[in-house]
Amino acid sequence: MNKVIETIMSRRSCRCFDPERMPSEETIQQICEAGTWSPTSRGQQNPIIIAVTNKELRDRISRMNSAIITGKNLVTSTPPGADPFYGAPCMLIVLVKESPNAMYDGPIVMQTLMLAAESLGVNSIWIHRAKEEFESEEGKQILRDLGIEGDYIGIGHVALGYAAKPLQEPKPRKEDYIYWAK
């Protein structure tokens, strides 16, 4: 089977990371570099990727994310107050500049990051609520502290690390997933 298709079919979301096993800086850099090669509308490259390996900032963002879950009474697989990043020691945050195609460009970067991670033996999961985090004053302050200026929309987080236990088996694909007009 084609290696790219095999990677797409083998990737699974990890919901239990080993918090002590951080991917190497070189590996994180490779994953981020792959994300920069994602297609973007008119080649404008509006998304940015923030690699967070600083535990204090990672935990702060986790608390912000958890507060959003609790405040909106969202139904998630994460119990209230628990770490919505499942113990992952690293997160990649994708933000995109406001533009007509922002909501298309950002998710492509997210997918590319997760596939690149899988190809390097690193587990991942897409975590939502970056939009709400970076609309908040605290989120805007984090961006200023990092030297990031401009109006960015939070797309999501890719939690990265190594699984602490085996990943779930894939669900069978539904029968009516593909319609073919010949």
Image: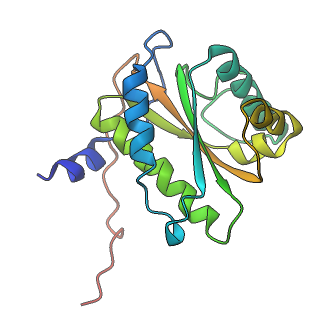
Expressed as whole percent of the image width and height from the top left, the position of residue 147 reads 73, 35
Expressed as whole percent of the image width and height from the top left, the position of residue 127 reads 58, 39
Query: Please, is residue 98 above or below residue 26 in the view?
Result: below
**Res. 39 image quadrant:** bottom left
Query: Please, is residue 19 above or below residue 64 in the view?
Result: above
Say how many tags the image has: 0
Left or right: residue 168 compared with residue 104:
left
> Which residue is most to the bottom?
182
- The structure residue drawn at horizontal position 59% and vertical position 47%, both measured from the top left corner, is 48
- The structure residue drawn at horizontal position 68% and vertical position 57%, both measured from the top left corner, is 97
Expressed as whole percent of the image width and height from the top left, the position of residue 111 reads 44, 50
Can you see residue 47? Answer: yes
Can you see residue 82? Answer: no
Q: How is the image coloured?
A: rainbow
Expressed as whole percent of the image width and height from the top left, the position of residue 103 reads 62, 62
- The structure residue drawn at horizontal position 32% and vertical position 56%, both measured from the top left corner, is 173
- Image quadrant holding the C terminus, namely bottom left
> As rendered, which of 1 and 51 lies closer to the eye?
51
> As rendered, which of 168 and 53 lies closer to the eye?
53
Left or right: residue 6 compared with residue 84:
left
- The structure residue drawn at horizontal position 82% and vertical position 42%, both measured from the top left corner, is 72
> As rendered, which of 66 and 101 lies closer to the eye?
101
> Which residue is most to the right?
137
> Which residue is most to the top?
20
Left or right: residue 66 compared with residue 92:
right
Query: Please, is residue 31 above or below residue 177 in the view?
Result: above
